[in-house]
Image: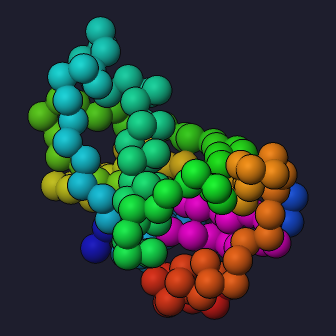
Amino acid sequence: MKFCLFSCKYAGDSATLQWKKYPLLFLMEEVETYSHVTPVQIRFNDIDIMGHVNNAVHQYYYDYARLQYFRDVFGRLISWNEQALVLASIHVNYQEPIGLDEQIEVHTRITRIGNKSIGMAQRIVSTHTGTVKSYSESVLVGYDRKKGATFSIPQEWRERISWFEHARF
């Protein structure tokens, strides 16, 4: 069984994230509760002078997994030319360095769906040890590129995400 060392909670309907760190012995959240897994190949360019994956590269891994998540939810690669989900907020906590020879995957799940926004939790996990390398909580906002304004999350999106997550949003 794999465990996360820390948990994060989304509070309220605003785009404000409130974080709470729990001691290792008091709260451990099972990684299996994440509905989507994306394997990630570490490239030599990802490594910094310290010999581990640079902290900014974690964001690329999360972006890639986010794209794969929505591709799998909707059954196709989404064209964001008209209606898109834009990243409004992201918070990343780094737990352990990632070496060039490690094998990792990103675990992704939706934590909430508001009127115009979606909360997402992600973790980068070692495939060999189950160790959480970093975790992220983000808020995505529905944005209509033609109108230049936000939009309400469509019912079809809610239904597909709910089906995929085995949850009701």
Q: In terms of depth relative to the viewer, which is nearer, 168 or 137?
A: 168
Q: Is residue 114 magenta?
A: yes
The C terminus appears in which quarter of the rendering? bottom right
Q: Residue pushed farthest front?
A: 146
Would residue 63 be found to the left or right of residue 139 on screen? left
Residue 12 lies, in percent from the top left, at 85, 65
Magenta-drawn segment: 109-121
Examine the rendered structure and indicate whether residue 32 appears above or below residue 88.
below
Viewer-proximal residue, 139 or 123?
139
Q: Position of residue 115 (x, y in %)?
A: 82, 72
Front-lying residue, 121 or 97? 121
Q: Residue at x 68, y 65 (%)?
A: 118
State whether residue 10 appears in this view: no
- Residue at 70% x, 77% y is 154
Residue at 28% across, 73% down: 1
Quadrant in the rendering for residue 61: top left
Which secondary structure is most common in the magenta stretch? strand
The image quadrant of residue 7 is bottom right
Q: Position of residue 104 (x, y in %)?
A: 24, 49
Residues 132 and 90: in front is: 90
